[in-house]
């Protein structure tokens, strides 16, 4: 009797697929964590003005965005005057109070005093519209206002 036996068949063993579900789930979790979802679809032109003294906001989840500007090319049926956009819809100045109330209701009660209203206003927008927005914010006691700008020389605004 021989100690070593020759292999009779030259069959290739089957590929082990036991680790395949683990790899698929790791990739799924990676893309779920790494993907950034867009907050709002802009329906207005938003060419922000330049500023030279700019600070970054610490917590972006405590910011309520109000957009103002002329409707973009896809939304010309809404006119050529500057409009307000709250979330994904055009709105009137009178809708700002309910928008602020909804945003405050969606946050935890201890975070409400730290909410900031960010105005993303087109550089060609009418100052009367911005004044009306600020007046409505004063009425609902939303006094922390931030103007969103691009970093650069102020002379570029002209």
Image: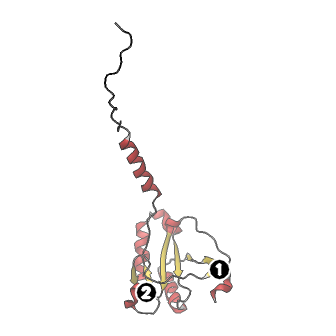
Front in this rendered view, residue 68 or 98: 68
Residue position marked by numbered label 2 in the rendering: 73
Q: CA distance from mark 2 to mark 1?
A: 27 Å
According to the image, what is the colour scheme of the structure?
secondary structure
Q: What SS does tag 1 mark? A: strand
Viewed as shown, does residue 158 lie left or right of 121? right
Residue position marked by numbered label 1 in the rendering: 51
- The residue positioned 35% from the left and 36% from the top of the image is 15
Q: Where is residue 91? Give x, y as percent.
A: 40, 84
- The residue positioned 43% from the left and 86% from the top of the image is 73
Locate the N terminus by quadrant.
top left
Locate the C terminus by quadrant.
bottom right
Front in this rendered view, residue 74 or 134: 74
- The residue positioned 57% from the left and 77% from the top of the image is 148
Specify which label sits upstream in the sequence, 2 or 1. 1
Which label sits on residue 158?
none
């Amino acid at each position: 009797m021989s100690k070593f036996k020759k292999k009779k068949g030259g069959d290739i063993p089957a590929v082990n697929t036991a680790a395949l579900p683990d790899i698929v789930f790791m990739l799924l979790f990676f893309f779920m964590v790494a993907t950034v979802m867009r907050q709002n679809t802009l329906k207005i032109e938003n060419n922000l003005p330049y500023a030279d003294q700019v600070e970054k906001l610490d917590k972006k989840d405590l910011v309520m965005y109000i957009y103002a500007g002329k409707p973009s090319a896809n939304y010309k049926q809404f006119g050529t005057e500057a409009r307000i956009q709250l979330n994904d819809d055009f709105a009137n100045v009178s809708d700002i109070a309910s928008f602020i109330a909804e945003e405050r209701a969606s946050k935890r009660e201890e975070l409400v005093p730290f909410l900031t209203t960010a105005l993303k206003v087109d550089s060609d927008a009418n100052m009367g519209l911005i004044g009306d927005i600020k007046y409505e914010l004063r009425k609902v006691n939303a006094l922390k206002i931030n103007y969103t700008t691009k970093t650069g020389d102020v002379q570029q605004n002209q």
